[in-house]
Amino acid sequence: MKTWKKVMLGSVTLLASMALVACGKSSSSTDTSSSKEVTGTVKLWVDTTQVPYYKTIVKNFNKEYPKVKVAVTQSPNGSANAKTDVGKDPAKAADVFEVPNDQLGSMADQGYINPLSPASTKTVKANNVSVAAKAVEWNNKLYAYPFAEQAQTLYYNKSKLSAEDVKTWDGITAKGVIATDFTNAYNYYPVFLSAGTNLYGTDGETLKGTNVANAKGVAAMTWLAQQKANKNVMQTSNALNQLKSGAAAATLDGPWNSANIKKILGKNFAVAPYPTVNINGKQVQLKAFLGIEAFAVNSHTSTKNQKAAATLAEYITNKKSQLIVYKNSGQIPVDKDAQASDTITSDPVAKAVMTMSKSSDHSIIMPKMAQMATFWNLSAPLINGAYTGSIKSSQYMDKLQTFQDAISKEN
Amino acid sequence: MKSYHAQRRLSLVFRYCLLALLAILWIIPIVWIILASFSYNDTGFVSTFWPKQFTLQNYIGIFTSDQFPFLYWIRNTLLVSLVTMVLSTFVTICVAYTLSRLRFAFRKKFLQIALVLGMFPGFMSMIALYYILKNFNMLNLGGLTLVYVGGAGLGFYIAKGFFDTIPVAIDEAAVMDGATKWQVFIHIGLPMSRPIIVYTALTAFIGPWIDFIFSGIILSSSGNAKTYTIAYGLYNMLHSTKGASTTYFTEFIAGCVVIAIPITILFIIMQKFYVSGITAGADKG
Amino acid sequence: MFKKHNKVQPPATYREVWSKGDVSFKLSFLLMGFVQLRHKQWAKGIALLGIQIAFWVWFIFSGASALSMLSNLGEIKSKKVVFDQTQGVYLTKLPDNSVLILLFGVLAVILLLAMLGLYIAHLRSMRTLYVQLRDGEHVPTNHENLHALIDERLHSTLLAVPIVLIVAFTILPTVYMISMAFTNYDGKHPIGFSWTGFKAFGNVLTGDLAGTFFPVLGWTLVWAVCATATTFFFGVLLAMLIESKGITHKGFWRTIFVIVYAVPQFVSLLMMAQFLDLQGPLNNILMSIHLISSPINFIGASASPLVARITVIVVNMWIGIPVSMLISTAIIQNLPQDQIEAARIDGANAWQVFRSITFPQILFVMAPSLIQQFIGNINNFNVIYLLTAGYPMNNNYNGAGDTDLLVTWLYNLVFGQTQRYNASAVLGILIFILSAVFSLIAYRRTNAFKEG
């Protein structure tokens, strides 16, 4: 019954907010004269839990584009697996599907998705924050319509840690336990970036631009190894459970879990950007990967539906739609106006995520290289090996070199 | 004499204790799964044996959920498994009977080829199966049923072992009396093989309830949760969205318990057929 | 294996059938069915003619092109992005779809071979007919032909549907998979790929996957031996315990153990993974009764490889022992008692009886099913995938973990990050060779194969 109620409540608030938005400003960028002419049939893939509110968004879309028939369906294994789901049979995949930005490079190379038209490129660049546009750019073309940004932040229990404590990693672990997962490269590869190394160059697109096999990389490995000895750093696959039981006071997690954590911590819920860490005697900002969620258009879509698909993708990532998505799932919008709106600025989670994503000392955009597949396969065992001590400090340099060579290969 | 009795008694007590201990060890995780399905939990992880808070919400949730149409899944799976059961049993029994009771030129070859084919890991065939079904526009429950039935032709070993144990003299006598082989099959072969038919049918029936891989490959592209079968539906519940494994975890367990109950009962009924099938087949070896 | 039969000299050569047979025979060399129709075997003639016409129609309209495209798997190998001025959107001109070309090419080859087989069978039956006519023997009528299908040719009737299913759902996919191993079908060539010979084999055996392949192969074998041996041995012991004198309610005890096996594995194993977690119930229980002071990482991503491997074998015992207990029970109940009695009278104790009489007998009866279990364990996807997902991580491996078997690694290569379809096909072939070698040795030894 609980989910039911939530959905009901959600859609009521949503209807109200929609009415407000609609009154405020009516369709800014699209010229209504040509909208009637767009026709076609489009299949849209979203995650299972997102289906209800995307149905609402599509209803709004159909008010403007009545001649486009849209089927909102759930993707087989969720947007995180868009590359494999589309790759299984691109012809059967949806015309418009949700995809995280790091998969765009290989999907573009493989020919699964189409670039944005010059007009759409202009709109996307004009309306959204610059990192969002940059995150979906590959070989000087945009390949998807961004609608949300994801960066992990620090969630903590206010009764155990103060806002001052959470500014540094050492401050946190001096007073409480941080529950976290060192087997996840998404969490801890950024330590190498904090230590001053690059992943695929400064732009994230240079094949030979990774420079991790050096003293800086070794310093990062050393920091990881030190955490094993720290009693207040808890390795766990279920940090939420530890927060609830009180065994832990803080964790690193993404906005997709913020609603769950809020429920668990209740009035003690608090969120902050990542702390600083002490690597090699220097206090540096702990970085995070910045992921941009976007919608891409399938290149297998028949020519007569391409325009309709592109139009739909653009519409469901506009400001109004981004705000609906935020309302229902807490995904942080990337539209400039949306980010400046009161609802967003008054949300501590959104604020923390925006702080993380705004500047390059807090986060880097996930690279889009096809080699990222190899990167994910190899980086997690490396980090875990440093943390558990199965890689000895004398082997750090060798292991880093092997890793760097493997992810810098042409394929 | 007394000490002998005492020793016997001691040995029996010891064996009972050992058996009880083993039984407890075996059943504890199952008890825990059932307990967990009644626990209130919002972290996606059950860390204690005894739930801190009991609730029926998980069961109510799974039956009334809008995004996860549990009742549709049950209906679909029931449909697929019933059709699979009838067709698979037919195919398996035909093959097993033919290979066991009839003699013809390609019999040995057939047995060898079947043995070889059985050794290729089934996963790789999935990609091909997907495209074959897609070509016939059958990426649906019908196609899934066909895949399950398609595998039945090679699953004849246990049934063949059973037929091997029936004396050939009975067939010969009937043929002497002028019966055709078809009549022998229908009037003698089938009635005598009731236990193995029950066994084959039950195995085929259970298959669709526990397969989450083939069903995932074939049904997922429809994008409509109402067309899923139970195993893939439940599996998808946890893996569809970031954070979903936290939100829906206990409902997932409740769903699992609901379907595990009938399968367990069926299996307990089936066990004696299972044993007679296996040992009959093994005796020949 | 191959039975020698003294071939009776064919009473007529094909040359003779061709030169001395009437026109319908000559025509039938080209187009099957005429001779049967001529001699009023209507059903057979119409069936042959019909199949043949269908085949040629298919061959002309699609089969020939499917076969010819098989040689290079499609002309266009790379995509091209173009801008469509009228719609104002970019379009992608896609490469030829090699997946479909290969699949339908393989299908065409199979159909061609099937047709060839039918033609040869037809030649034989034509010759028989010729001899029957020449020697004035009885020529089967249409009715007799049909009747044979439910009598002396009943096997063809009963096997027809199963064979079609086996060809479509097992043989075709298997041949397709084997041919995939000789292409460069991977993440870089997902749509248009080409033949590359043994290159993918090279990658697995000596290239970038070799450092993972051999250790994983080693563990797969260790696992298969341990998993099969432990479940068998302890299953027999458990069966003997339940069957031993004085224990009552045997059915009840057996059922308790069988329940574990009956619960679907994707439920019991997924839950078991949580049960064994670093912060899971088992560690909590053990710590609260002070058996251990700090939690044991049984199967986590950062567990010790040895602990994790022992744990999966133990969990497999939890699932596997009930089955082998059931089977052993049936065997024990049917064991001849006289030998055991004789040994008892001679003063053998329980252990000696077990070691030299009961156990060897059980082993003898169960040998074939043990071989099947061994092959099954080499391919035991569920236990590893659902319980550990291949963890703990190993920084020397590429895309696999310490408990990954070849078959779960194969799955990762297809559905994981890297999409190396050709390498996974190579693994499939190697797994096949492995299973084939083991079962051949074992079947030879147990003689089960000859029994057929």
Image (cartoon, coloured by chain):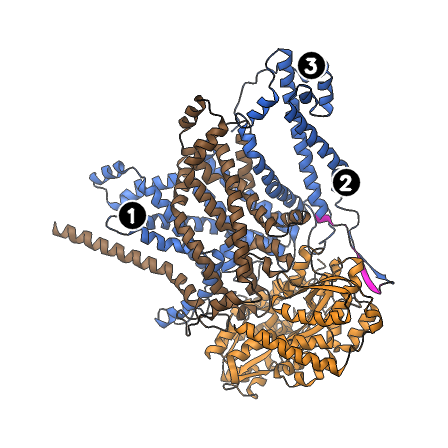
Chain colours: A orange, B brown, C blue
- Badge number at residue B202: none
Q: Can residue C221 be seen in this view?
A: no
Q: Is residue B285 rendered magenta in the image?
A: no
Figure check: B65 above or below A340: above
Q: In which quarter of the image is residue B239?
A: bottom right
Q: Name the residue under label 3.
A: C16
The residue lying toward the viewer, choosing from C382 and A330, is: A330
Q: Which of marks 2 and 1 is nearer the N terminus?
A: 2
Q: Is residue C94 rendered magenta in the image?
A: yes
In terms of secondary structure, where does tag 3 sit?
Answer: helix
Q: Provide residue C373's location: percent of width, then percent of height.
A: 46, 46
Amino acid under label 2?
Answer: Ser
C-alpha gap between disc 2 and disc 1: 66 Å
Magenta-colored span: C87-99
> Image check: A198 left or right of C272?
right
| Disc 2 chain ID | C
Q: Which of marks 3 and 2 is nearer the N terminus?
A: 3
How busy is the neighbourhood of tag 1: few (under 14 within 10 Å), some, or many (20 plus)? some
In terms of secondary structure, where does tag 2 sit?
Answer: helix
- Badge number at residue C243: 1
Can you name the residue that lies furthest to the top here?
A: C135
Can you name the residue that lies furthest to the left here?
A: B1
> Image check: C287 left or right of C166?
left
Q: Mark 2 points at which residue?
A: C65
Seen at 82% across and 63% down, the residue is C90
In terms of secondary structure, where does tag 1 sit?
Answer: helix
Figure check: B199 above or below B225: above
